[in-house]
Image (cartoon, rainbow, N blue to C red):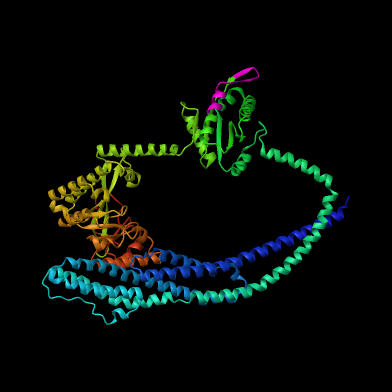
């Protein structure tokens, strides 16, 4: 037997060797991780640069290429630059030159590049929209009078020059081009066509030089070259660190060899003690995987086994009214019931291959199946339930009839779904065995939907569907000129439900149209009472294509012509507006005939897009809340708002900023020239319009 001094020396040496190993591991791990992180950040930034340059080229050449990918890559490139700057390895003094180069050279070049992208996006959108508009507009020349159709040929030549210039990025196509149309025709349509064409042609001639200049800048950036230079510099410095780690690794290897020689000696010396330890470990392992009362596998073993099965199925059985058995006869009696039930189930499943049984805790047992169909497991469960229901347990001369509730499942998550089905069985006295399927959760949804539909039905019957009115303020005069009518349901308890709780479900029923009728009628009635304001009513595609709704709307307009001119129609963004549908155009034309206006809601997201304005006669654009609410903190959103504002002004339309909830935001919008604002800062939706017509900032 080794003396205590030798054992202490071996232990200390082992601890020292282990400490050196741990230290080396962390040093090597951190260096490798930091080195890989930096190289990955460098490569990723290079990839983003290549990707965004490719997307910019596509957008410069193609008329209908989306700019969403560029915006996404723009954000990624900004974030990746920050990651590169904050790379952990750059905090070490050895890499100070790399950090300095990134901070000064690469960062400045990337930021300049990102700024140029912003300029490109604005110019590209402007040029692209005008070219697309002219393409549609030129086709209208075919409908001019025969003697004026020569204008079509001139217009096509000019348009082709613009398209060639955009495709080739060469100003020679338009440098000496006569880009304005002219005709002595007295026809008003002809002169209107020429006026609109010349307006966009002049705009393109002004924008093309800037557009081509900024395109060449973004396509010829030197970011890739700079990144390659830094990659080479970094690899040169990192090579010295790797050489140091190699030497350190050799030292650690020698120490470990010495330590393992001592360790082998100790293992041989204490073989008998080690054998006893193994026996004790086996006993501990058994207690960790088995239930001490029944001898079955326990829940932790269930979780382990479940992960190893390719196609598992589960049977979950729970003893009915087991708590009452414990309360009446005591815990010892209850434990005897559990042991007896486990034996019955073990006997039953011993004849069924591919099964393993577990006690999950309390009075719940589980059985795992491998490669069994859901139908087979369900049939096995029914037989088990029948077997137990027809068997009595006798404990200490007391006979007790035991029944079980059983659930089966093959759908992941295995245990959670089976437990859900078991809870349903416990609530339903008509069945004792249930197989889980996805329709069980659907039933809950059906129940909620039916309750909501009943709320809508009773609200319509009892005249509790009402409009709430939210003020729309002229930011320049601070006068309340308009109100948007928003649907609400007033419950018998006087609680007011917003459309979030019922409108989506109502849209799937006939009650949706009844709600629309109520909103039209009550909004017009309110307009009669408040003759100094305009009111807007939300209309969806479902409303526009419904003949009954349209008939009711225009019948009320005819009966209230003095009010109709102050009732505007707000096209909801939740559905795509089919701009080439003749019904839509007829509807908008008739709305305008009464002096009403047409608004596009939530512009800047979802289905809303610039194509509306080349085909639909839109008066007002409501800028989406997701843009407006973030302009104070998100520079990109601010640029988007400015672009939309400039576009609406250029198209002769009004604009409304939604979701204005602070004075700071309202002041900023006013300074930007936004015409109208709507939001809780001015007024939340109310049962009636406000008693005053002017607000303050």
Residue 169 lies in quadrant:
bottom left
Does the magenta portion include 383? yes
The residues colored magenta run 382-399
Please say if 398 is above or below 271.
Answer: above
- Residue 540 visible in the snapshot: no
Q: Quadrant of the C terminus?
A: bottom left
Question: In percent of the image, x 72 and y 40: which residue is there?
Answer: 284
Residue 309 lies in quadrant:
top right
> 442 or 161: which is nearer to us?
161
Question: In percent of the image, x 80 and y 46: which residue is there?
Answer: 274
Farthest-out residue, top: 397
Q: Is residue 384 left or right of residue 51?
A: right
* Count of numbered tags: 0
Does the magenta portion include 286? no
Image location (x, y in percent) of residue 294: 66, 31
Residue 39 lies in quadrant:
bottom right
- Residue 228 visible in the snapshot: yes
Q: Is residue 226 left or right of residue 552?
A: right
Image location (x, y in percent) of residue 173: 30, 79
> 613 or 398: which is nearer to us?
613
Farthest-out residue, left: 186
Image location (x, y in percent) of residue 506: 31, 43
> 103 or 691: which is nearer to us?
103
> 648 or 41: which is nearer to us?
41
Q: Is residue 217 left or right of residue 365?
A: left
Image location (x, y in percent) of residue 617: 22, 60
Please say if 112 is above or below 521.
Answer: below
């Amino acid at each position: 037997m080794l003396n205590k001094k030798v054992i202490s020396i071996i232990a200390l040496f082992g601890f020292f060797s282990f400490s050196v190993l741990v230290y080396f591991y962390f040093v090597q791990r951190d260096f490798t991780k930091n080195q890989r992180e930096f190289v990955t950040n460098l490569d990723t930034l290079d990839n983003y640069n290549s990707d965004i340059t490719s997307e910019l080229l596509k957008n410069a050449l193609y008329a209908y290429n989306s700019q969403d990918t560029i915006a996404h890559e723009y954000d990624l490139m900004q974030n990746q630059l920050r990651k590169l700057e904050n790379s952990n390895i750059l905090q070490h003094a050895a890499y100070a030159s790399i950090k300095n180069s990134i901070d000064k050279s690469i960062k400045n070049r990337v930021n300049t590049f990102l700024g140029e992208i912003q300029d490109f996006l604005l110019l590209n959108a402007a040029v692209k929209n005008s070219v697309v508009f002219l393409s549609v507009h030129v086709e209208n020349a075919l409908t001019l009078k025969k003697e004026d159709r020569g204008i079509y040929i001139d217009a096509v030549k000019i348009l082709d020059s613009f398209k060639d210039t955009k495709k080739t990025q060469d100003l020679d196509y338009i440098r000496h081009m006569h880009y304005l149309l002219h005709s002595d025709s007295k026809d008003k349509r002809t002169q209107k066509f020429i006026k609109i064409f010349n307006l966009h042609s002049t705009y393109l001639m002004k924008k093309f030089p800037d557009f081509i200049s900024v395109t060449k800048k973004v396509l010829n950036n030197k970011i890739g070259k700079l990144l390659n230079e830094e990659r080479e510099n970094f690899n040169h410095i990192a090579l010295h660190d790797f050489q140091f780690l190699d030497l350190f690794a050799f030292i650690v290897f020698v120490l470990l060899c010495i330590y393992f020689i001592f360790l082998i000696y100790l293992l041989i010396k204490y073989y008998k003690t080690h054998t006893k330890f193994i026996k004790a470990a086996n006993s501990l392992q058994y207690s960790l995987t088995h239930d001490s009362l029944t001898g079955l596998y326990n829940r932790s073993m269930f979780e382990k086994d479940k992960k190893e099965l390719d196609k598992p199925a589960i049977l979950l059985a729970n003893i009915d009214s087991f708590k009452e058995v414990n309360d009446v006869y005591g815990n010892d009696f209850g434990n005897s019931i559990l042991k007896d039930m486990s034996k019955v189930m073990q006997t039953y499943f011993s004849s069924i291959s591919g099964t393993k049984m577990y006690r999950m805790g309390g009075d719940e047992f589980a059985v795992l199946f491998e490669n069994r169909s859901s139908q087979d497991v369900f049939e096995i469960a029914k037989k088990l339930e029948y077997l137990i229901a027809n068997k009595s347990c006798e404990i200490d001369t007391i006979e007790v009839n035991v029944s079980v509730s059983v659930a089966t499942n093959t759908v992941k998550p295995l245990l959670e779904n089976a437990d859900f089905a078991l809870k349903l069985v416990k609530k339903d006295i008509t069945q004792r065995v249930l197989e889980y399927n996805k329709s069980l959760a659907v039933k809950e949804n059906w129940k909620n939907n039916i309750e909501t539909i009943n709320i809508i039905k009773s609200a319509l019957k009892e005249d509790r569907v009402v409009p709430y009115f939210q003020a729309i303020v002229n930011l320049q005069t601070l006068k309340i000129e308009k109100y948007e009518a928003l649907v609400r349901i007033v419950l018998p308890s006087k609680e007011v439900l917003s459309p979030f709780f019922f409108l989506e479900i109502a849209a799937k029923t006939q009650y949706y149209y009844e709600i629309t009728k109520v909103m039209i009628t009550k909004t017009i009635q309110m307009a009669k009472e408040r003759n100094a304001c305009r009111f807007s009513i939300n209309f969806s595609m479902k409303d526009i294509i419904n003949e009954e709704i349209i008939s009711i709307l225009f019948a009320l307009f005819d009966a209230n012509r003095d009010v109709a001119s102050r009732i505007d129609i707000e096209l909801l963004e939740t559905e795509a507006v089919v701009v080439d549908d003749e019904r839509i155009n007829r509807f908008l034309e008739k709305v305008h005939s009464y002096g009403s206006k047409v608004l596009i809601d939530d512009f800047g997201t979802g289905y809303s897009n610039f194509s509306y304005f080349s085909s639909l006669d839109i008066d007002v654009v409501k800028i989406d809340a997701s843009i407006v609410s973030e302009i104070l903190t998100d520079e990109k959103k601010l640029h988007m708002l400015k672009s939309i504002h400039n576009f609406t002004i250029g198209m002769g339309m009004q604009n409304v900023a939604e979701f204005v909830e602070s004075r700071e935001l309202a002041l900023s919008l006013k300074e930007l020239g936004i015409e109208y604002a709507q939001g809780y800062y001015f007024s939340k939706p109310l049962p009636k319009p406000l008693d005053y017509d002017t607000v303050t900032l």
